[in-house]
Image (cartoon, coloured by chain):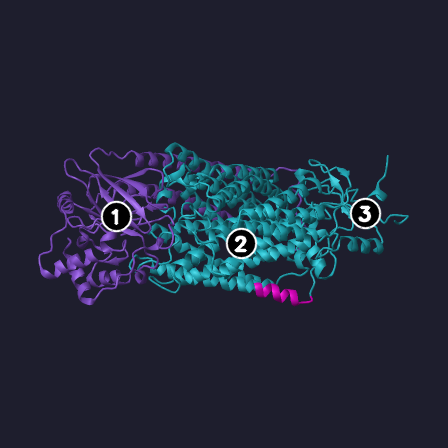
Chain colours: A cyan, B purple
């Protein structure tokens, strides 16, 4: 096409910058919206969607707490209550906690590693649409009163064809297929991005710890999620086709479900917990004004946690009749995983101890982590012990423990991360005063809700009960917990108010409002469509803090085509510069076709056969090369 | 009455001892970490976004911080090993409760009640009842656990931890009540609609009292002695009741619902949901689903006189 190709560089003209922005923008209009592939657009939608699911699941929990406020209450009957806790657990685990971490990573990782895009941008868009449709399916089921009601863990035989004949469990199982497909695709996208798209010079040992945490987590996704897809598919087959995987009368095994489910289910806790360790390792250095202490120890701890996480699923099954020796092994493994977490906590304390503190809202949320997560870790040590677990398993003690771990370990740091990176997400700083109110309401409300549950469990209150009799000594603690739940709801409301208020204000954030050291703060808030005007060259772990070294940038990538720089896995040496795909409607169309296949298969196995045709058509469209792009690529080839 | 913190038997008190040890260790560690955090926050000077980042550590070791991190990790690891040891020892002790001369009971979980079958005890024959377990103080008890439909969990926190009842798998739980009393148990594994209302009682009596109770349970039901009780029995036989329930000594031999041979002697009906008195029993017979939504028991509309007679007869089934 043009005679002198437009290329980028550190001193490029405004014309080049405009060309870059135009090249990497998503097309306008409604069709453009459905065709978007820019990682920031997709990730922003992803984050907002998961947050909506978080709020919905929180409201379900509020309904449950209202029912349990007083003994023998009949506001909500057993069937609805069972649906509520099933939907709450399922939504929080599958539609919020795991995907939100992937979504935040999909937004931040390219910015942190100096890349213009995420790898496989169309697949990233497809993963989002599949996730959205899976989540909508689940809530549509609730709306038309066929929600699943066998718990987020769907133990067989209760979830099998004989004891749950309605469609709820089929919808639950297919929702798993949707979200796990999306999760696996996101894992591939993120791992490839991290391995191949880092800015030159960002060797593995210079990667920000959040990127490390993401990398480790996505590898765990790849090993953990197939187990749950396998067990939920076997459940669907039992229910729809009449196989007997889980039917003991025909040689199936009920415990098979538990092994497969928890082989995924326990690592899942760490899928939720490891990315926030990365948030914390980003926030602490910025607000302690020094690089993190013990970077190699932190990285090794993340990797150790990921390995150990696969060796402790049986501690969910201590009350079954598996052999004693096996249980002791899993006790030891469960306690051992405390060691890498402890190392990270000690390194953070060391960093705070030797730093100078800028006490802002993101740091407050991280300090709450120290209180809540550490307490959750202590109760984790208790439930890892076979004898103690025999008492507290399936009681409110475990409800308390898991909320201390998941809210303390994930939601508190996540809110910290929202405050910290909001300038990058939306170009504005959230209000500090409202943030402090939200923080304290959340922190106090959280402890008021969940601390009494430890005692409730020891006093014998089992989980998943829609009511309890008066006179068990549980009334006061349940009422307290309900008050706390309303405080949490109020704090989340304050956050929403804060976001709305901030989005309406005209005040814009600077590129680096916190004085941080990593690459995402070198670009404007919010970043332009192409992220970086010129790809930086990295010489250390905190490039913005360290004295500048030469070369500072690489130049010569196309400004009028989606050309990216691919670097080597270990040392991030420049390797080649492929062209990235342009926006396209096909990922959306493929996701719609996939949805038809998955939902159809709830009703007839033939849907797998017939609905794979539109999937194939849409995917052929997706991968069909366009002449224009080919021409552009050929024009840019340089022969040696 | 349903608490892990007030043990009434050796198994539960062993677990409580381990609990106290673990709680103490965890509290000390938790306090130490919080204290370190607090000191770090108090001693560190304040900064703002413009404070230049301190890069003095880049490329250098920080031996003091390093020492403390390594020391803290070492202490934590040591404590964790101690706890693993305590866990394993407790677990071994739990699984080695001597059970010679144990009382043997088979318990089956149904949606949503418990069937209890006492095995032959020496020469004395076994018997069946529902939702109530009587055990002699000081004698070990071995309960073999079965599930008729979905997974249930046997749990009496004052006596022992839980054990799952899993369809297609056999399990047993061994415990000993060392203090006389009434202990409540409840299903701990989510088992569907009425999981919340699936409880039972364990009544630990001195051995002589237990033997007297067991001797009564082995007897068939008492024949009705007055006209109204006779009428009550006839109502029971002519309505659907006898299809599902057994009353030994009569022609009622149903096996779908609980054995009612000595229902008048029980403290609760509907699996620990309602105390056993005439009003509750009447409500339960007429409209069980109002009291326990989802129960399998169907409503039975009876003329008031028939209902009264039925209640009188059932109360005589001690």
Quadrant of residue A258 within the rendered picture: top left
Asked if A362 appears above or below A263 in the picture, the reply is: below
* Stretch in magenta: A496-506
Q: Are marks 2 and 3 on the same chain?
A: yes
Is B83 on the left or on the right of A110, as rendered? left
Q: Residue at x 62, y 37 (%)?
A: B61
Specify the subunit that label 2 lies on: A
Of the pair B213 and A623, the residue shown nearer to us: A623
**Residue beneath disc 3:** A627
As measured in the structure, the alpha-carbon distance from the residue carrying label 1 to the one carrying label 3 is: 76 Å
As measured in the structure, the alpha-carbon distance from the residue carrying label 1 to the one carrying label 2 is: 53 Å
Q: Does the residue at mark 1 contact the one at mark 3 (Cβ under 8 Å)?
A: no
Residue A142, can we see it? yes
Mark 1 element type: loop
Image location (x, y in percent) of residue A127: 63, 49
Quarter of the picture containing the C terminus of chain A is top right
Is A41 on the left or on the right of B271, as rendered? right
């Amino acid at each position: 096409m043009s005679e002198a190709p437009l290329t980028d560089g550190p001193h490029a003209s405004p014309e080049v910058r405009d060309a870059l922005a135009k090249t990497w923008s998503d097309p306008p209009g409604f069709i453009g919206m459905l065709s978007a592939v820019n990682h920031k657009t997709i990730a922003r939608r992803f984050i907002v969607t998961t947050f909506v699911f978080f709020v919905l699941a929180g409201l379900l929990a509020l309904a449950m707490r209202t029912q349990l406020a007083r003994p023998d209450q009949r506001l909500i009957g057993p069937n609805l209550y069972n649906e509520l806790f099933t939907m709450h657990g399922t939504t929080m685990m599958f539609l919020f906690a795991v995907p939100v971490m992937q979504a935040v990573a999909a937004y931040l990782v390219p910015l942190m590693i100096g890349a213009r895009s995420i790898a496989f941008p169309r697949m990233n868009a497809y993963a989002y649409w599949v996730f959205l449709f899976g989540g909508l399916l689940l809530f549509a089921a609730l709306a038309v009163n066929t929600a699943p009601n066998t718990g987020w863990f769907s133990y067989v035989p209760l979830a099998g064809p004989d004891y749950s004949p309605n469609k709820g469990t089929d919808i639950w199982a297919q929702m798993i297929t949707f979200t796990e497909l999306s999760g696996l695709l996101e894992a591939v996208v993120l791992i490839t991005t991290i391995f191949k798209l880092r800015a030159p010079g960002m060797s593995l040992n210079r990667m920000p710890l959040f990127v490390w945490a993401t990398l480790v987590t996505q590898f765990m996704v790849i090993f953990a999620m197939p187990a749950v897809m396998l067990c939920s598919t076997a459940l669907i087959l039992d229910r729809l086709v009449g196989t007997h995987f889980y039917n003991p009368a025909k040689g199936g095994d009920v415990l098979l479900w538990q092994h497969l489910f928890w082989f995924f289910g326990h690592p899942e806790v760490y899928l939720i917990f490891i990315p926030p360790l990365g948030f914390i390792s980003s926030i602490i250095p910025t607000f302690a004004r020094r690089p993190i202490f013990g970077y190699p120890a932190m990285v090794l701890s993340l990797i150790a946690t990921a390995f150990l996480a696969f060796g402790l699923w049986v501690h969910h099954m201590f009350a079954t009749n598996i052999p004693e020796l096996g249980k002791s092994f899993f006790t030891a493994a469960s306690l051992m995983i405390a060691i890498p977490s402890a190392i990270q906590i000690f390194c953070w304390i060391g960093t705070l101890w030797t730093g100078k503190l800028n006490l802002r809202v993101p740091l407050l949320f991280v300090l709450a982590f120290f209180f809540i997560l550490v307490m959750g870790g202590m109760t984790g040590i208790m439930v890892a012990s076979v004898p103690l677990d025999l008492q507290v398993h399936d009681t409110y003690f475990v409800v308390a423990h898991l909320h201390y771990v998941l809210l303390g370990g994930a939601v508190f740091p996540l809110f910290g991360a929202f405050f910290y990176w909001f300038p990058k997400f939306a170009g504005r700083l959230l209000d500090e005063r409202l943030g402090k109110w939200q923080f304290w309401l959340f922190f106090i409300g959280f402890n008021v809700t969940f601390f009494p549950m430890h005692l409730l469990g020891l006093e014998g209150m089992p989980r998943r009960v829609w009511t309890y009799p008066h006179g068990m000594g549980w009334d006061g603690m349940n009422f307290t917990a309900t008050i706390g739940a309303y405080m949490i709801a109020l704090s989340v409301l304050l956050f929403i108010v804060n976001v709305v208020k901030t989005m309406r204000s005209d005040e814009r954030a600077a590129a680096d409002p916190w004085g941080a050291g990593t690459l995402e703060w070198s670009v404007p808030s919010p970043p332009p469509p192409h992220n970086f005007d010129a790809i930086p060259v990295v010489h250390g772990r905190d490039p913005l803090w360290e004295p500048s070294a030469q070369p500072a940038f690489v130049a010569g990538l196309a400004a009028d085509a989606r050309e990216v720089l691919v670097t080597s896995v270990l040392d991030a040496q420049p390797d080649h510069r492929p062209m990235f795909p342009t926006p396209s409607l096909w990922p959306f169309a493929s996701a719609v076709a996939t949805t038809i296949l998955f939902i159809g298969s709830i009703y007839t196995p033939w849907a797998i056969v017939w609905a794979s045709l539109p999937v194939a058509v849409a995917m052929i469209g997706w991968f069909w090369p366009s002449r224009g792009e080919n021409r552009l690529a050929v024009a840019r080839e340089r022969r040696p | 009455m349903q608490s892990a913190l007030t043990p009434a038997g050796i198994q539960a008190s062993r677990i409580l001892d381990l609990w106290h040890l673990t709680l103490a260790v965890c509290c000390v560690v938790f306090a130490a970490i919080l204290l370190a955090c607090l000191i770090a926050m108090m001693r560190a000077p304040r900064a703002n976004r413009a404070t230049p980042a301190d890069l003095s550590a880049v490329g250098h070791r920080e031996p003091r911080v390093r020492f403390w991190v390594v020391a803290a990790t070492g202490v934590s690891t040591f404590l964790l090993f101690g706890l693993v040891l305590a866990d394993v020892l407790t677990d071994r002790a739990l699984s080695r409760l001597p059970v010679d001369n144990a009382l043997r009971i088979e318990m089956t979980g149904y949606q949503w009640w418990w069937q209890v079958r006492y095995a032959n005890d020496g020469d004395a024959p076994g018997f069946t009842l529902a939702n109530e377990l009587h055990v002699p103080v000081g004698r070990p008890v071995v309960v073999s656990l079965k599930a008729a439909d979905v997974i249930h969990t046997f749990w009496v926190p004052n006596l022992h931890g839980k054990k799952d009842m899993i369809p297609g798998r056999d399990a047993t739980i061994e415990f000993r009540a060392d203090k006389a009393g009434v202990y409540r148990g409840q299903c701990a594994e989510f088992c569907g609609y009425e999981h919340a209302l699936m409880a039972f009682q364990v009544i630990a009596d001195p051995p002589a009292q237990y033997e007297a109770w067991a001797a009564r349970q082995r007897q068939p039901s008492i024949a009705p002695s007055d006209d109204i009780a006779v009428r009550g029995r006839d109502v029971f036989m002519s309505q659907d009741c006898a299809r599902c329930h057994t009353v030994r000594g009569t022609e009622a031999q149903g096996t779908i619902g609980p054995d009612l041979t000595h229902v008048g002697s029980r403290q609760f009906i509907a699996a620990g949901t309602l105390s056993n008195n005439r009003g509750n029993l009447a409500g339960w017979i007429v409209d069980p689903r109002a009291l326990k939504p989802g129960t399998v028991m169907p409503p039975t509309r009876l003329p008031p006189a028939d209902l009264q007679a039925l209640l009188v007869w059932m109360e005589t089934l001690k």
